[in-house]
Amino acid sequence: MTEAPAHSTNDWQFDHLTLLAAPGDTGVCGLAALLGLEPGRRPAFPFGGNWFYQDETPLLHVIDAAVNGGATFDHLAFRSHRPLDTVLPAVTASGLPYRVMRIPETDTAQIFVQIAEKFVVELDVPVGTAGSTAADYSPPQPE
């Protein structure tokens, strides 16, 4: 059996699903319970929310939001060990709109790629040498 190259094009793994929901949304709490997920640690984002874990893995991210009619889909995420400076050229070449953020207190970049009007895919990768490309989250500014 031959070993795959260090930066194979098939090294993406599902990471998490993110929903927008009012705090304590019964649908989200019911989904977490149904899947056997437990609330756990969340980075210091400048907005409210919760992460639900299966063992040590956060699989469901919830962002606090005023939504009508219950929780709504925000995005799904994949992760790779490929560094940002090797992934970003491919994202740029795709022609799809994107933005790059850094998860607070980590060396992980999030590339949010706009696939369609209401469909975003988050690509989580190590910051690597392109750290200055990733913006830090900041609290929302008053209008």
Image: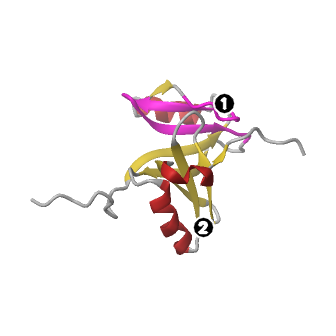
State which region is magenta. Answer: 42-66
- Residue under numbered circle 1: 23
| Mark with earlier residue (2, 1) | 1
Closer to the observer: label 2 or label 1? 2
Judged left or right of residue 87, residue 47 is right
- Residue under numbered circle 2: 116
In magenta stretch: residue 44: yes
Q: In the depicted view, which residue is nearer to us: 101 or 97?
A: 101
Give coordinates of residue 72: x percent, y percent. 61, 47
> CA gap, disc 2 to disc 1?
27 Å
Q: Where on the picture, by quarter, is residue 139?
A: top right
Give coordinates of residue 95: x percent, y percent. 58, 74
Q: Residue at x 55, y 30 (%)?
A: 42
Q: Amino acid at mark 1?
A: Pro
Identity of the residue furthest to the left in this view = 1
Give coordinates of residue 54: x percent, y percent. 39, 31
Identity of the residue furthest to the right in this view = 143
